[in-house]
Image (cartoon, coloured by chain):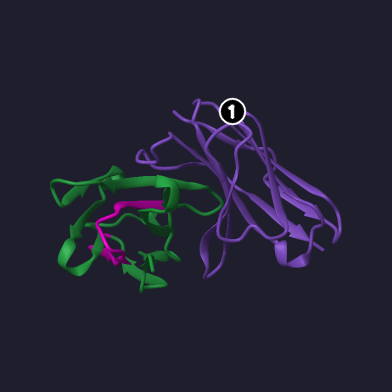
Chain colours: A green, B purple
Amino acid sequence: AQSVTQPDIHITVSEGASLELRCNYSYGATPYLFWYVQSPGQGLQLLLKYFSGDTLVQGIKGFEAEFKRSQSSFNLRKPSVHWSDAAEYFCAPLFKWNFGNEKLTFGTGTRLTIIP
Amino acid sequence: DVKVTQSSRYLVKRTGEKVFLECVQDMDHENMFWYRQDPGLGLRLIYFSYDVKMKEKGDIPEGYSVSREKKERFSLILESASTNQTSMYLCASSLHTGTGGLFFGSGTQLSVL
């Protein structure tokens, strides 16, 4: 069955520290992969996406993510977090389902807290 | 920039009422989606539509219906609201391939009392 897992429900990091948010998927092929961010009281905003090619992709707000086929992972990273990065982050693989349509599946999210 | 507008930010309804949630997008996207978001459960797909007057059930369609009479507008209908439908509802749109990602509205927090 197709699935996505974000193993960390809540992460707390100090401002200026590095960040890595984990995402693993289960699928018989390589899906398209997305990361979204949701600031408090807002909808979701696309951070970055991976389809093929270079396995390290750059996104907005200084985020990057690395696709590792052998680990079925697509972890999100940032070298130095800012207080404004406090939000909830969702990993979302795009799996193909019946009739050739694609279906975006969201992980349960990781809430990021930044401490001064 | 793509704009997805949800008509209400907060709604309070009573059990048994018929509830309409409206969503409008301004980028001529073919696909539109309704999700509900609950703590610890992430986003779950209720219904989606890939064309006018077309609709497909998502993962949790029970108790909901949708309407898409015009390309830019996608409505979610709760025929008889129940307390377990209290949730944040998010509308999204995308190009037909889906590979550009989804563009989300700000959400409607619905409380059913």
Q: Residue at x 47, y 30 (%)?
A: B2
Q: Quadrant of the C terminus of chain B?
A: bottom right
Boundaries of the magenta span: A16-37
| Crowding near the residue tagged with mark 1, few <14, some 14–19, many ≥20 C-alpha atoms within 10 Å | many
Residue A101 visible? The answer is no
Q: Disc count in the image?
A: 1
Element class at badge 1: loop
Label 1: chain letter: B
Q: Nearer the viewer, residue B46 or B55?
A: B55
Decide if residue A113 is on the left or right side of residue A42.
left
Q: Residue at x 50, y 32 (%)?
A: B30
Q: Quadrant of the N terminus of chain B?
A: top left
Seen in the picture, residue B106 relative to B86 is either above or below; the reply is above
Q: Residue at x 36, y 74 (%)?
A: A7
Q: Nearer the viewer, residue A31 or B16?
A: A31
Residue behind mark 1: B71
Question: x, y percentage for residue B105?
Answer: 55, 41
Does the magenta run of residues contain A26?
yes
